[in-house]
């Protein structure tokens, strides 16, 4: 039996509101986006959504309304997500 898809919104909830901006910036850096440290927070949010949509285009995620469901293993080498990957989706 394979692992279930992971809800991005559930992952964000696990990270917590206080740590979310740093988590989003780490996600963008992991995805290879340049200039992340100097980006305004609103731009960071836009770029996170764009990167999640790129994962959909690559077949590594699917979008369902306001959430993205990531395929198993997509975030395996994203170290900042590691502590938040276990638990129910």
Image (spheres, rainbow, N blue to C red):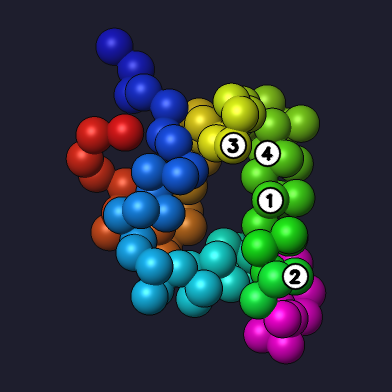
Q: Which residues are magenta?
A: 33-40
The residue indicated by pointer 2 is 43
Q: Which mark is residue 66?
A: 3
Residue at disc 4, secondary structure: helix
Q: Indicate which disc, 1 or 3, sits on the residue closer to the N terminus.
A: 1
Q: Indicate which disc, 1 or 4, sits on the residue closer to the N terminus.
A: 1
Q: Residues within 10 Å of mark 3 (few under 14, many from 20)?
A: few
Q: Which mark is residue 74?
A: none
Whole-number angstrom distance, CA of label 3 to CA of label 4: 15 Å
Q: Residues within 10 Å of mark 1 (few under 14, many from 20)?
A: some
Which residue appears farthest toward the top when viewing the image?
1
Residue at disc 2, secondary structure: helix
Who's the residue at 21% across and 40% down the image?
Answer: 87
Query: As drawn, is 86 to the left or to the right of 59?
Result: left
User: Which quadrant does the C terminus fall into?
Assistant: top left
Query: Residue 34 lies in magenta, yes or no?
Result: yes
Whole-number angstrom distance, CA of label 1 to CA of label 4: 10 Å
Give the percent coordinates (x, y) of residue 9.
45, 44
Give the percent coordinates (x, y) of residue 5.
43, 27
Q: Which mark is residue 49?
A: 1
Q: Indicate which disc, 3 or 2, sits on the residue closer to the N terminus.
A: 2
- The answer to whether the residue labelled 1 contacts the one labelled 3, judged by CB atoms less than 8 Å apart, is no
The residue indicated by pointer 4 is 55
Predominant SS of the magenta segment: loop
Q: Residues within 10 Å of mark 4 (few under 14, many from 20)?
A: some
Give the percent coordinates (x, y) of residue 16.
34, 64
């Amino acid at each position: 039996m394979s692992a279930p898809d992971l809800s991005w919104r559930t992952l964000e909830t696990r990270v917590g509101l206080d740590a979310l901006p740093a988590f989003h910036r780490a996600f963008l850096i992991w995805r290879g986006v340049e200039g992340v440290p100097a980006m305004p927070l609103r731009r960071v949010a836009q770029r996170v959504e764009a990167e999640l949509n790129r994962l959909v285009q690559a077949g590594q995620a699917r979008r369902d309304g306001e959430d993205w469901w990531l395929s198993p293993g997509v975030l395996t080498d994203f170290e900042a997500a590691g502590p938040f990957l276990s638990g129910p989706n």
